[in-house]
């Protein structure tokens, strides 16, 4: 019988929504805390300010750019046709959301930043292998995803190190860093705007039926970035310090300039996170919704309604507000000492890597990327600037994620399938 929104189908949908909200809450408490941790740790944003920034830009990224990665999570990891039975498929997706959410709750309690992407993908693979065997998993796609997990922290560290060294050369190490910041501040503002606008324009507005080519998006983005950079020239030129100021006072004044830049990059990272990681919570929910609508397990394209993205964005923001402080402390204070200039370098680097991956439809880990960027920024001051013990604990938690969520998802599936 074709499944519709009968009483039974409605119950399944409600259960899926509950677990999607739980998974989104866990992602907000852990992953969004990662994204906001550098800003809070450096003092650029208070926790309340981080929540406001995340609320606005997480929603924007989720609604405007989230669809592409959601498709990958929904139907690109486990072949729907290999499962066959729609009830089995929906039970597996619900189990995957529950397993990921449980792990995120545990990891956040331990103050360990783990990957929401890692968690949900591992849970889907665990369910898929139990139900359909190894043939149910798209191992080519999995290889792409795993490579993204491995490459993103390394790439993040490299770019973070490079960006911070550029900041040091152009501003911080100058004889007059305040004067240098007047010249380079608008450039860094333009760079931040470039990342954010390019993400939105280049295949980022499909929900609004606007899909620009790369060259057109690049042209618009360059124009907007240049305009914004020019508009901020008077703002930076008004910043002055007294002629008798000490070097320390000038350095502090320069770091205060980077507070504004870091808030802008925090917005970029939040947008990037919403674009990429909303899929972790709503991808399986979208799979359940499409199955309920069509009555069959299928891989053909079906439009995901916008309320699903809004739901994911809401859960993410609530998670950050209610339980995000634990992971914020780890990212913002324990890996390495962060200042606004270092936080800016880490965040703009992370936004670049994450948004590039989002447009490829590759669900990389915000956590892996941002931790890599923070490590790269710390390496600019040498290995002693890093807390290797904390980094070791973080990597251990990453290694534990896949087996835990895979086994947990399989167990939850066997518990709920009799009721489907």
Image (cartoon, rainbow, N blue to C red):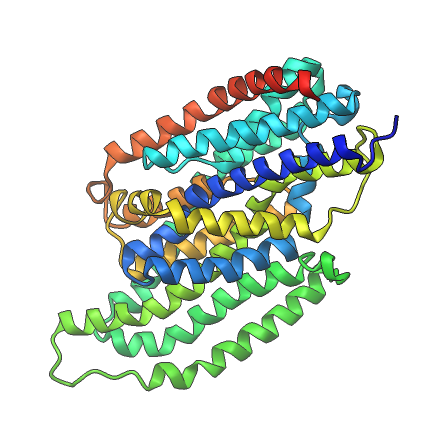
371 or 22: nearer the eye? 22
Q: Is residue 27 above or below residue 305?
A: above
Residue 274 x/y as whole percent: 55, 51
Q: Is residue 295 above or below residue 188?
A: above
Residue 184 x/y as whole percent: 38, 73
Seen at 71% across and 33% down, the residue is 75
Seen at 61% across and 69% down, the residue is 221
State the quadrant of the C terminus. Answer: top right
Seen at 60% across and 62% down, the residue is 198
Query: Based on the displayed image, in which of its 4 quarters is residue 419 positioned?
Result: top right
Name the outermost residue toward the right: 1
Residue 94 x/y as whole percent: 62, 29
331 or 20: nearer the eye? 20
Seen at 47% across and 39% down, the residue is 26
Residue 271 x/y as whole percent: 53, 57
Give the side of residue 380 with respect to residue 407, left or right: left
Give the side of residue 262 with respect to residue 282, left or right: left
């Amino acid at each position: 019988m074709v499944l519709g929104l009968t009483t039974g189908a409605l119950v399944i949908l409600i259960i899926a929504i509950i677990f999607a909200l739980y998974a989104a809450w866990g992602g907000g408490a852990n992953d969004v805390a990662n994204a906001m941790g550098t800003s809070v740790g450096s003092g650029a944003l208070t926790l309340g300010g981080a929540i406001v920034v995340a609320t606005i830009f997480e929603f924007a990224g989720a609604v405007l750019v989230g669809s592409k990665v959601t498709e990958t999570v929904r139907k690109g990891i486990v072949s729907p046709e290999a499962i066959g039975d729609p009830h089995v498929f929906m039970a597996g997706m619900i189990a995957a959301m529950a397993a990921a959410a449980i792990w995120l709750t545990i990891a956040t309690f331990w103050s360990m930043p783990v990957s929401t992407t890692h968690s949900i993908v591992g849970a889907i693979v665990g369910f898929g292998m139990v139900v359909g065997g190894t043939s149910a998993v798209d191992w080519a796609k999995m290889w792409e995803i795993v490579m993204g997990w491995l490459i993103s922290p390394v790439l993040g560290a490299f770019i973070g190190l490079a960006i911070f060294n550029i900041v040091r050369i152009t501003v911080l190490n100058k004889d007059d860093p305040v004067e240098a910041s007047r010249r380079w501040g608008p450039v860094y503002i333009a760079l931040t705007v470039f990342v954010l606008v390019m993400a939105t324009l280049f295949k980022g507005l499909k929900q609004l039926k606007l899909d620009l080519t790369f060259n057109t998006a690049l042209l618009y983005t360059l124009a907007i970035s240049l305009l914004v950079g020019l508009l901020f020239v008077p703002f930076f030129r008004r910043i002055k310090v007294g002629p008798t100021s000490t070097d320390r006072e000038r350095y502090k004044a320069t770091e205060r300039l980077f507070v504004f830049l870091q808030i802008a990059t925090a917005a970029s990272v939040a947008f990037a996170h919403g674009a990429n990681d909303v899929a972790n919570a709503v991808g399986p929910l979208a799979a359940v919704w499409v199955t309920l609508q069509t009555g069959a397990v299928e891989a053909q394209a079906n439009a995901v309604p916008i309320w699903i993205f809004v739901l994911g964005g809401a859960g993410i923001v609530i998670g950050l507000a209610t339980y995000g402080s634990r992971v914020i402390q780890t990212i913002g204070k324990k890996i390495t000492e962060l200042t606004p200039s270092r936080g800016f370098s880490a965040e703009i680097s992370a936004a670049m890597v994450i948004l590039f991956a989002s447009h490829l439809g590759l669900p990389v880990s915000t956590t892996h990327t941002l931790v890599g960027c923070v490590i790269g920024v710390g390496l600019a001051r040498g290995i002693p600037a890093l807390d290797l013990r904390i980094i070791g604990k973080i990597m251990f938690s990453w290694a534990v994620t896949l087996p835990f969520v895979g086994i947990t998802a399989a167990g939850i599936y066997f518990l709920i399938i009799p009721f489907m």
